[in-house]
Amino acid sequence: MSLLTDEVRALLGSRRVYTAPEPLGAAACRYFAQAIGDDNPIYRDGEFARAHGLPGVTAPPTLICETGQYTGLPMDRDGYAGHSWHLDVPGTRQVRGGNAYTFHRRVRPSDVITATWEIHDLTEKRTRDGKDMLIVGSRATYTDQDGDLLAVNEETIILVAMDGGAG
């Protein structure tokens, strides 16, 4: 039996769109930089940022990728309130395959972010030890209030069968 069932196959092309209810804000930029231990003054000092060719403070790059701040979703059983595909395929465990980020411009506190997630690839393979796995490719595109591209996050999620091959 394949992990790529009709139900899973129907997810291909699925799209979710989340738009923040307000601008990102300077406090969010400053707090996120502090939380990740990045003390670069461009995240908190407008004068410093302008002296370095920026219009003012900016956000640390991956802040916009943390969708929990603007999706308005309820927390899941693990306490996460951001975007998730909730890929619950019986008999599998989920493994994060990784993320590849491309940043197109610095995010400003005045930006209102829209994240558009889409599942664009479903591929079946086998692990070295013969277990079935399903590789799910999804893409998040982040734009500002004018539709200008800010960043893209290519995410890979891997579902691995808990037993041997499915068949």
Image: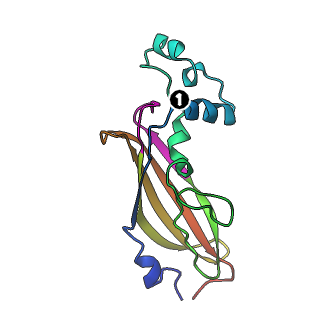
Q: Quadrant of the N terminus?
A: bottom right
Residue drawn at (54%, 40%) of the image:
62
Between 166 and 82, the one lying in front of the other is 82
Residue 73 place in picture, x, y as percent: 53, 59
Residue drawn at (39%, 67%) of the image:
14
User: How many marks on residues?
Assistant: 1
Q: Which residue appears farthest toward the left when viewing the image? A: 146
The amino acid sitting under disc 1 is: Ala
**Please, is residue 135 above or below residue 33 in the view?**
below
Q: Is residue 36 visible?
A: no
**Please, is residue 2 above or below residue 41 in the view?**
below
Between 101 and 29, the one lying in front of the other is 29
Q: Which residue is mark 1?
A: 26
- Residue 134 magenta-drawn? no
Q: Which residues are magenta?
A: 99-113
Q: Quadrant of the C terminus?
A: bottom right
Residue drawn at (63%, 68%) of the image:
94
Crowd around label 1: few <14 · some 14–19 · many ≥20 (10 Å): some
Q: Is residue 19 visible?
A: yes
For the stretch drawn in magenta, the main secondary structure is loop
**Please, is residue 52 above or below residue 9 in the view?**
above
Q: Which residue appears farthest toward the front when viewing the image? A: 21
Quadrant location of residue 166? bottom right
Residue 122 place in picture, x, y as percent: 45, 70
Element class at badge 1? helix
